[in-house]
Image (cartoon, grey):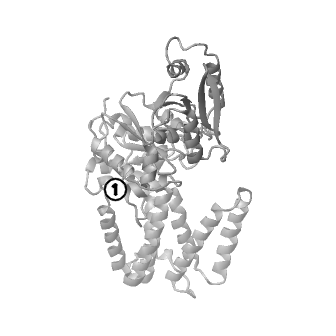
Amino acid sequence: MLKQENNEQQPIFSSVTKNEKYLSERMGIGVTFDVGIRQLTILETDVHLYFVNGLCDSNFIIEILETLFSMESTDGGSVVDAIEDNLAHQQVSPITLMGDLVTQLLSGLIIILVDGEAKGFAVDVRSYPGRTPSEPKTEKVITGPQDGFVENLIMNTGLIRRRIRDEKLRNEIIKVGSRSKTDICISYLQDVANPDLVDIIKQELQAINVDGISMVDKAIEEYLIKQGYNPFPQIKTTERPDVAATHLLEGHVLIIIDTSPAVMVAPTTYFHHLQHVKEYRMPILLGTVTRMFRFLALFINMFMLPLWLTFVLNPKLLPNWLDFIGPSEKSNLPIVVQIIIAIIALEFLIMAALHTPNNIMSAFGLVAAALIGQIAIDVGLFLPEVVLYSTIAVLSSFALPSHELGESNRIVSMVFIVFVYFFHEEGFMVGLTLLILYLASRKPLQSPYLWPFLPFNPAAFLSIFVRTPMASDKKRPSIVKPLQHKRQT
């Protein structure tokens, strides 16, 4: 570790030959094909240019080389000053340490070293491979922008800048990973976001001591909020620039990670994972109705099977007008076993569908749904009600905007089923109480996870269920503790 720190603080040599030898030993120049060097003679002085194939724009490099070759004199100054003055590029920065040189080079910048000078220049000619912005598959809308974040951090910050042209918008870069040196951008509005929140996020990111974060956003989330074995998502991610910009204006902080198309929003609550941009792309009443259906899907996903099992185990709790929900037949297996087997089987189908090629997925779904389910009923393995309610409960999770929340709710539902089987209706109430207490105890980034339910905020709690008109939404959410509580409207 000490040797690595010494390498980072090693000054650049004044001899380009020594620099070449040092970089060849450290970076494998001549062995690894994608790290290249071009040796030039400019104004009778040796000049070395270093680059990484695949991360640099060749057209810019050619323009810089043409500029250097066309230089005829130093105009009375030194060669290094003449080169700096003639570089026709908007981002040219001096470098004096080898550690900075290597980091900048591996980030896609080209490095220019001049013989006799103990410094170099980094020229930003990055052109990362990637795709063009397209609509995210999980956050589609019928009307609205069709662009989305990509794996390029610079392009992602540009998509946000296009929507928020405010001089107070800050994009700070932090590198994480001793080997990956992944660029992470912290984006916030300086006069809106709580500075304590920004500092907490910075400190948590800077405290990450790992060689690399190839899983990017999920790895950062685990380090940032100490996820542990908590199944519930505590950081919201979005691939839509309009959603990210909206959260910025509310006082949230964005965490944009290079190579990831998912931008993290902090802090967020349980109810943030139930919001979808579609609600704001339709009339107010329709948006409110959509929210109501979504909360109904949440209830079905988490509580329908445990409640049904409660009524099956204790039929006296069931009103007469609900007798038809069954079961109407006797079964060979205990109903709780049938429910567990059905849920596991449906999970297998979901996992299989994810790994099934698209051209046979439709046929696979029809065979699985029509044949397997019906045969299981015919042979007496399942009651029809078990198949019906289990399928509805699992499918309702896909009506939720957050896939992770749906997965978490299915796990909670299984726990509730076990509680109900052993303790009947008392088990359901105990499970519900423990669930609320557990969620209420979560405070990711020092923010209550169940806000505005706990602590209770009447106006904010109502806005969870009713989509308020944008013209009347003049206050920023208090959960982020913004510096400006009122919007400037």
Residue at 63% x, 36% y: name it: 37
Q: How many marks?
A: 1
Q: 359 or 293: which is nearer to us? A: 359
Q: Secondary structure at mark 1?
A: helix
Residue at 58% x, 35% y: name it: 17
Callout 1: few (<14), some (14-19), or many (20+) C-alpha neighbours within 10 Å? Answer: some
Residue 16, by quadrant, is top right
Q: Quadrant of the C terminus?
A: top left
Question: Where 202 sits versus 93, above or below?
Answer: below
Q: Position of residue 179 (x, y in %)?
A: 51, 51
Q: Quadrant of the N terminus?
A: bottom left
Left or right side of 122 for 451: left
Q: Position of residue 147 (x, y in %)?
A: 56, 37
Question: Where 157 sits versus 204, above or below?
Answer: above
Question: Where 331 sits versus 371, above or below?
Answer: below
Residue at 60% x, 35% y: name it: 50
Q: Position of residue 316 (x, y in %)?
A: 38, 82
Q: Position of residue 346 (x, y in %)?
A: 58, 70
Residue found at the very far top of the displayed protein:
75
Q: 213 or 394: which is nearer to us? A: 213
Residue found at the very far bottom of the displayed protein:
332
* Residue 426 visible in rendering: yes
Residue identifier under label 1: 444
* Residue 401 visible in rendering: no
Q: Please state which amino acid type lies under the numbered disc 1.
A: Pro
Q: 336 or 349: which is nearer to us? A: 349
Q: 24 or 146: which is nearer to us? A: 24
Residue at 46% x, 46% y: name it: 7
